[in-house]
Image (spheres, rainbow, N blue to C red):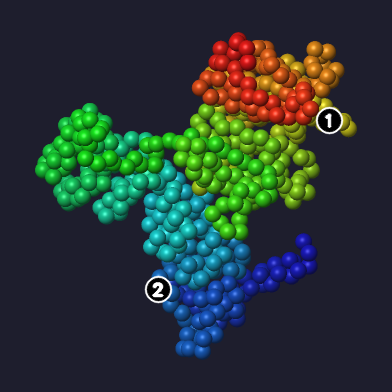
Amino acid sequence: MDLTAKHGLALLDQLRKMRETEHLTDVVLVAEGISFPCHRVVLAAFSPYFRVMFTCGLRECNNREILLRDTPAESLALLLNYMYCSDLPLNNNNVQGISIAAFLLQMDDVFIRCRKHMIENMDASNCLGVYYFARDLGAEELADHAQRYVRQHFVQVCQHEEVLELEPHQLGKLLMSDDLNVYQEESILDVVLSWVKHSTVTETEVRIIHLPELLRKVRLPLVNPDYLREMVKRNTVLLAEGECLDMVNEALEVSTMHPAAVPRKLKLRYGMETTDLLLCIGNDSGGIRSRYADFAEQSFCYAPSTTRTYYMTSPRYGDALGYVSTGVVTENNGIIVAGEVGVRRAARQKDINVEIYRYKVEAQGTWEHLTSAEHRDSYALGSLGDAVYLLGGQMRLKNQYLITNCVERWSLQGGPWRSAAPLPLPLAFHSVVRMNDRLYVMGGRTPQTFSMEDEPDRLSNRLLEYNPHTNMWKELAPMKYSKYRCCAVVLKNEIFVMGGIGCEGGDRGQSRPLSRCSGDLQSRW
């Protein structure tokens, strides 16, 4: 610890002791009838609100006692403890009270910490409360984040009490959104009926009054007709209200019409339609120009069906990865990338590893670190079930890098890396795809001395299949050309291999033709 830091801590410690003994205190804050003797200079140093109060020249400048009407005493005590001791223990029970006090006293650093805590601890059980709290407080960034979370996780939100405690107009406004991530409109109908029934007998009578208004927010023609009929049988409130019954009958009538005869086509909600995207995560510092004038995005998604481009946070931003080597999309559409840390972070680490990160949709586009593996480069990353695989590449042995056949497996549920069956031959710069619960490896560079049958430039044309159930590799129909640095994808149960570098022609095969192998993988490419 340097002298400046020690000096500051000594000053802070003396101020804390003087406050505890009420020595030289010159102002008393009062909240909820509880008095807090303090020092004006400390309050003014941490709070612009107090700084203005004590220097404005008005009557409050000389008042010995200051009443804080809208500040909870418990929250004020914690803020004062932070001023004098630098300690601020935040939890889900006190964070809103502290953030209110910090907001009123203009303590921006504390409010930012509170906002960060609420975002990091947001879940389906509390996101609605956070949204209305932030909206009423005027914290727009927090409110926007909470609103996006509610919409993204609406099905899970509906399983908790918060949504059933909403006022009618609040629930109605929420149900109007096209951005609710629901797979079926039945979820919307369920929450409306649950909201009406979630009350005492007297309250139910009051809530039923709002049922027609809320039912209009449900896109009833999108509800399965059989499900809708069953809901009418189970919920007599739909029969008791004539207007509600009319809406149900109209929806059932629409379900019997020919699509061309439907009066108007209802818009689908966000979760009811899916779009296939091409995901690009690059290392070019220039990147792709985004909607921001002075900002270049390095990661984006392209929708071929609509020709639209969507931007996402790059794993290179912040203190995550400095270089993205490869990536994979899991069976449940999780996005995982592997690479190396940036220069600043590498300087603080003893060893350089392969770092694995996952895109967190629920956290509004942040990347979370999953695990680290022993360093290698030119490897391939694959995914099967709930596991990711690091395959081959070049690893350092003593003072040289050697191409390896090492395969390691890591469960997305956590735990250590475990060895899987090694590749039949050492490979680097190879490609891997997942199809029909198998991994397929093709192409790549091999050590020149591995097999005399390989081409002189140490390239492979082999197609290798990995079975996770038997933990064994099998060699299948080879590609027509040996190549490395090629791209492989699966489409309609066929493997397509594009580009890459070969060893034929004047350009050394750097414009390899498209190759295709059918799903049985026994036929020729």
Q: Which mark is residue 69?
A: 2
- For label 1, the crowd category at 10 Å Cα-Cα, with few meaning under 14, some 14 to 19 and many 20 or more, is few
Q: Which residue occupies the foreground of this view, 163 or 4?
A: 163
Residue 368 in percent (x, y) is at: 59, 42
Task: Please provide percent x and percent y for residue 306.
Answer: 46, 40
Q: Amino acid at mark 2?
A: Arg
Contact between labelled residues 2 and 1, with CB atoms less than 8 Å apart: no
Q: Quadrant of residue 505?
A: top right
Helix, strand or loop at label 1? It is: strand
Seen at 48% across and 59% down, the residue is 141
Q: Amino acid at mark 1?
A: Tyr
Furthest toward the front, the residue is 506
Residue 64 position in % (x across, y down) = 49, 84
Instruction: Determine crowd level at label 2: few under 14, some 14-19, many 20+ residues with C-alpha closer than 10 A.
Output: few
Number of the front mark, 1 or 2: 1
Which residue lies at the image location 88% right of the left edge and 32% below the top edge? 399
Give residue 315's quadrant in the image.
Answer: top right
- The residue positioned 60% from the left and 20% from the top of the image is 516
Measured in 3D between alpha carbons, the distance from the residue under mark 1 to the one under mark 2, in whole angstroms, is 69 Å
Return the residue at label 1: 401
Q: Is residue 235 visible?
A: no
In the picture, which quadrant includes the C terminus?
A: top right
Q: Callout 2: helix, strand or loop?
A: loop
